Image: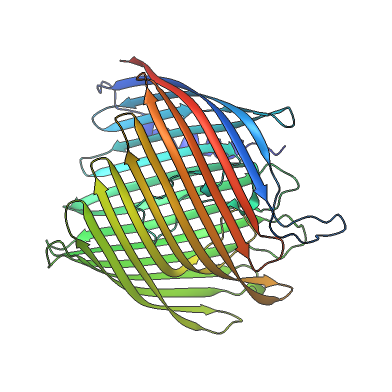
Amino acid sequence: MKKIFIPQILVGALAIGPFVLAPPGMARTNSLTAGMTLAYDYYDRQETDTVEIGESGGSAVADDDYSRLVLTPLLRYVSTSARDSLELSAAPSVRYDLDDSETEWDGDLFLGADRYLTELWQIRGSNRFVRSDYSSDDSVFSEDPDSDPQTPDTEPQLSSDLGRTRYWRNTLDLASEYRYSQDSLALVGFNWSVLRNDDDDRLSDDYDRYTVTLRDEHRFDIRWRSVVEFSAVRGEFQTAEADAVSEDLWEYYLGLSLENNSIEHNPLFLDYNFIAIEYDEPLQGDGEAHQLRLSWRHDASPQLYTIIGAGPSYLKTEGQDDSWGYNGIAEVNYLLERGSYRLALEKGYAADSFSGTEERGFVDFWDAGFYFTRLLTENLSLDGRLGYRWEERTEFLLDEFEEYQEDRYSAGLGLDYAFSRYYSARVGYSFVSLDSDRAGFDYDDHRILLSLSWERELLRW
C-alpha cells in the first residue's frame, strides 16, 4: 500500500486556514448533517481483443470483475455568516468483496471555505482527498451543460480505460475574485492535483499537476462582453517503468471570447483557443494548436435554445507535418419544469495528458452526446445519457511517432426514488465500450449500482 498524501493534506488545510478565521462577534448559522448509504456494486469488464504482453501474457487493460457491498457513513458540518462560509465533510466507505471475501476502504474528505474581504472582493479555497477506483464514466449523468470546454478542468477526469484501478487523489483549489464593475470580474486561481495509484502493478502513471489561472470577464456595454483566460499547467509524472523517457511537461492555454448581443435573443460569439505543450524531453515533440470559432446562440423560447458554430483549426507538432482542419459545435437544449434535454455535437483539438493513462499530448476528436433528466412523479426521477467519441492521437514510441484512432461508446440510465423525507433509493446502470487501433485495448464495461440512502440534519444553531 502506498503512503497517504499527508504532506498534501496538511498543505491544503493550512492554505485554507485563513479563510475560516471569522471576525469575532459575527453572527453565524451552523448545521450538522449525518447520513448513511448501503450499496451493491456490480462491475464486469469483457476484453474484446487481447494481445500477449511479455512472458506471462495478458492484456493491455485491467480485468477487474467483481461484486461488492459498500457501506458509506456521512458527516457534514456547514457554518455560514453574512460574509463567509465553511464546510467540512467526511464520507469513508467500507467495501466487502462478495467474490473474494475481502474488505477494502475508500474515503472522501472535503474542506472548503470562502470569504468576502470587501463587498466586491472574495477569496475561496477547498481541499478534497479521495480514495476510490471510480473513473469519469461511472457517473450515470456527469455532463455539466454550463462547463466551458475552452479551459482545462481544475480536476482532470480519469479514464475508464484502466478498469477499476484503485488510486488516491488530493486536490487543492485556491482563488481570489474581484468584481470591479457590473458583470465584470478579475480572477486569480491556483490548483494542485496529486494522483497516486494504490497498486504496485499499476497500468497507469502517478503525477503532480500544478495550474495557475488568470481570468478577466469584462462588460463594455449592454451589447459587448469579453472573456480572457490564461492558464499555465505543470505536469510531473512518475512513470511505471523506471527507465522510461521523461514525460514531464508544461501546458499553456489561452482563451479569448468576444460576445455581441445586438440582436435580442441571438447573441454571437467569436472565440479563439490556443493550446501549447512543451515536454522536458526534446524527443517527445512539442506542439501547439490554434482554433477560431464563430458561434450563434438562438433563444427560441425561455425553454428552448440552440447553439451552432464553426471555424478553422491549425495543429503544429515537432517531427510531424503541420495540419489544417476545422472545429465546430452544435447544441439543442430543451428545459422543462419537470426535466431537461440536451443534444450536443462538437469537433476540435484538446490536450489530454492527465487522465491517469500513459497517453499524452493532443487529441483530435468528435464528441456527440444526448443527456436528459426527467421528474416522473413528485418523488421519482429518471436520468440518462448516450455518448459517442472518436479520437485520433499520436503516440511517441521507439523514437518515432505512431498515429492511432479510438471509438468510444457510452450509455447510462438511473432511477431515483425519494421517500419518507430522509430516505432515497437509486438504481443505476452504465456501459462503456472502446474500439481501438491498438491491439489489446478493446473492452466492454458494464456496471450496476443499487443504493439505499438516509440523510438528515441533526442540529442547527
Seen as rendered, the residue at the extreme right is 55
The reply, left or right, for residue 215 in relation to residue 72 is left
Q: Is residue 248 visible?
A: no
Seen as rendered, the residue at the extreme bottom is 321
Q: Position of residue 263 (x, y in %)?
A: 12, 67
Residue at (56, 67) in percent of width and height: 361
Residue at (65, 55) in percent of width and height: 443
Q: Is residue 404 visible?
A: yes
Q: Position of residue 217 (x, y in %)?
A: 26, 58
Image quarter in which the N terminus is found: top right
Reply above or below: 420 against 307. above
Residue at (54, 53) in percent of width and height: 209
Q: Position of residue 368 (x, y in %)?
A: 43, 62
Reply above or below: 196 against 184. above
Q: Which is nearer the eye, 451 or 354?
A: 451
Q: Position of residue 364 (x, y in %)?
A: 50, 71
The reply, left or right, for residue 265 in relation to residue 387 is left
Seen as rendered, the residue at the extreme front is 376
Occupied quadrant, residue 111: top left
